[in-house]
Amino acid sequence: MQTKTPRRGTTQLTRRGRIVLIATGAAVAAAAVAVPLLLPDDDAQTETLTIPEGWRSGQVYAAVDKALGVPAGTTKKALPKAGLKLPRDAGGNPEGYLFPATYPIDSQSTPASVLSYMVNTANKKFGAGQVTAGAERNAVNLYQTVTIASMIEAEAGSKEEMGKVARVIYNRLDQGMPLQMDSTINYALNRSTLATSERDTKISSPYNTYARMGLPPTPIGNPGEEAMRAAINPTPGNWLYFVTVKPGDTRFTASFEEHQKNVGEFNKEK
């Protein structure tokens, strides 16, 4: 499956593989998009729920449970009857479509109503003309674009890096190379870490982009607008590899040999 990629030994494509785990505080709320929840009486609003960019669906369900004061697992159980307007490709899985934003909550809010607004908001954001045009330009469909954006969200260390990460993904797809994204391994293992072992890359999972070609079957988190923007407008370049040697120093290259040197520097920094 990796015939066009030099044997990697114990190195990884990236040291990223993280999923943003930001508490719902003022700093996050300031950066999130505020979305109304059809409150019949604005005076009834008592609190807000902030969903940060990159959170996985399981984190969103738990946050909704807590915000509504319902038993753990209630929101996930509400999915089958929530009537979420998801694309056919999603197969009923809302991963990627629980749009990151700050949502007001009141006594009439339910797990189903909160999830519906998240998905409806995502459909409005993702259904814009420039998004669909960008997907077509990159020879992928909208659902695949959301999947790519979710990997960008998980892999990029900053907004400035997102366009380059997007280009690496498209370049590897175009050249028939496995994506080798640590973030998809983390999703399969339900964890968040910067270290991916050789053993991790051999797990049997459709999300193992070291062993399987192409995109993972679903998004691996819920991307924000910046990641979607990068997915439809990747930065021009020939990069095939990247590694964050240290904070603020992410190196992109088309040369495997140069990438190996960069990984060596990363290992020294550790």
Image (spheres, rainbow, N blue to C red):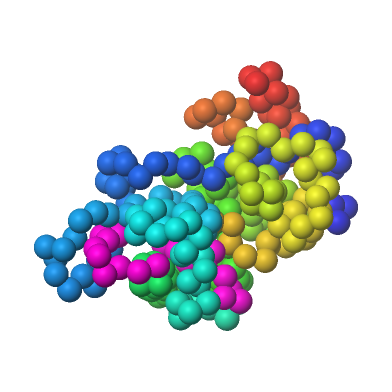
Residue 108 part of the magenta segment: yes
Instruction: Identify the residue shown where x is 40% and y is 72%.
Output: 112
Residue 99 % position (x, y): 41, 62
Tell me if residue 198 comes above or below residue 246 in the rendering: below
In front of the other: 219 or 62: 62
* Extreme residue toward the left, this view: 43
Residue 172 % position (x, y): 70, 55
Residue 251 % position (x, y): 60, 34
* Extreme residue toward the top, this view: 268
Instruction: Identify the residue shown where x is 88% and y is 52%.
Output: 3
Q: Is residue 235 left or right of residue 194?
A: left
Q: Is residue 122 left or right of residue 180?
A: left
In front of the other: 62 or 23: 62
Magenta-colored span: 90-111
Tell me if residue 170 comes above or below residue 88 in the rendering: above
Instruction: Identify the residue shown where x is 81% and y is 55%.
Output: 204
Residue 228 appears in the picture as rendered: no
